[in-house]
Amino acid sequence: MSDVPIPSREDGRQAFNEVLAQYDGPAYLRRARRVQAAYDQLLDECRRQRDEWLAMSRLRLGMLRALAGGWETLAPHLADEGQTQYLGQLWALLDPRLRVPVAPTTSAGVLRDALRDLTESLERFNNRWLPFVRGLDFTALNAERADYNRYYLLEKECAVRSPHIARAGYKPLDPLTADDVLAVFPPLPIPSPRPPQ
């Protein structure tokens, strides 16, 4: 009888590592990367569309701030004191940059008009943004998430050879919805002007 070499456990591990190197990591990691990449791509597309549609609101906010010279100046034209804080938060969020300097004014009519222009611009944005997000197609992305839930643990257990280690840190993914996107990119609240007297 001829001698047949029996591969050692170390030989099997080396072959496994060579196959692993050819495919950029084990299947469970590739699957997790695909799910994350699909989610990141969706958010990038939403961010680009949002930035494009916010261009006019940014301009209106920048004009209002420049005309007022500061948020405190607008207090008499706003429904309550909290509105100036909101405008400051909106400023930080949108980070408007005017291309040309605008001189401040003390004209109440000009400030009211600028405030009205901003609120109308924000309303138009929200009226476009909400239907856009609600109309997103999550079918392919949610299929990736369902496959992740179905195969990730099995693939990881095959790679690490331990069900206990495979389950550590695992959390199934819920299907993605428009509400999840709106939690990241919500509609913008509209400042409340003081009602005319």
Image (cartoon, rainbow, N blue to C red):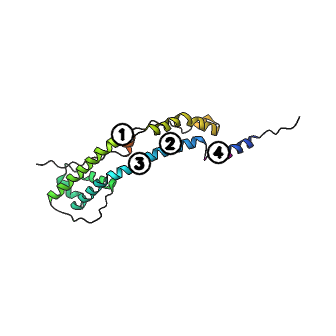
**Dot 3 amino acid type:** Glu
Q: CA distance from mark 2 to mark 1?
A: 21 Å
* Residue 165 visible in the shown view: no
As drawn, the label of residue 35 is 2
* Relative height, residue 62 to residue 166 (above, below): below
Secondary structure beneath dot 3 equals helix
Query: Looking at the picture, which amino acid does disc 1 mark?
Result: Gly
Residue 173 x, y percent position in the rendering: 48, 37
Q: Is residue 89 magenta?
A: no
What is the magenta range?
A: 18-24
Mark with earlier residue (4, 1): 4
Dot 2 and dot 1 residues touching (CB under 8 Å): no
Left or right: 130 as drawn, with respect to 4: left
Circles 3 and 4: CB distance less than 8 Å? Answer: no
What residue does disc 4 label? 20
Kindly identify which residue carries mark 3.
45
* Residue, disc 1: 135
Position of residue 185 measured from the top left corner of the image (x, y, whole percent): 36, 46
Furthest toward the right, the residue is: 1
- Residue type for callout 2: Val
* Comes first in the chain, label 2 or label 1: 2
Farthest-out residue, left = 197
Residue 64 spot, x, y in % from top left = 23, 58
Tag 2 secondary structure? helix
Point out the tag, 3 or 4, that comes first from the N-terminus: 4
Give yes or no for residue 19 being in the magenta stretch. yes
| Amino acid of disc 4 | Leu
Label 1: how many residues lie within 10 Å, few (<14), some (14-19) or many (20+)? Answer: few
Q: Which is nearer the N-term, disc 4 or disc 2?
A: 4
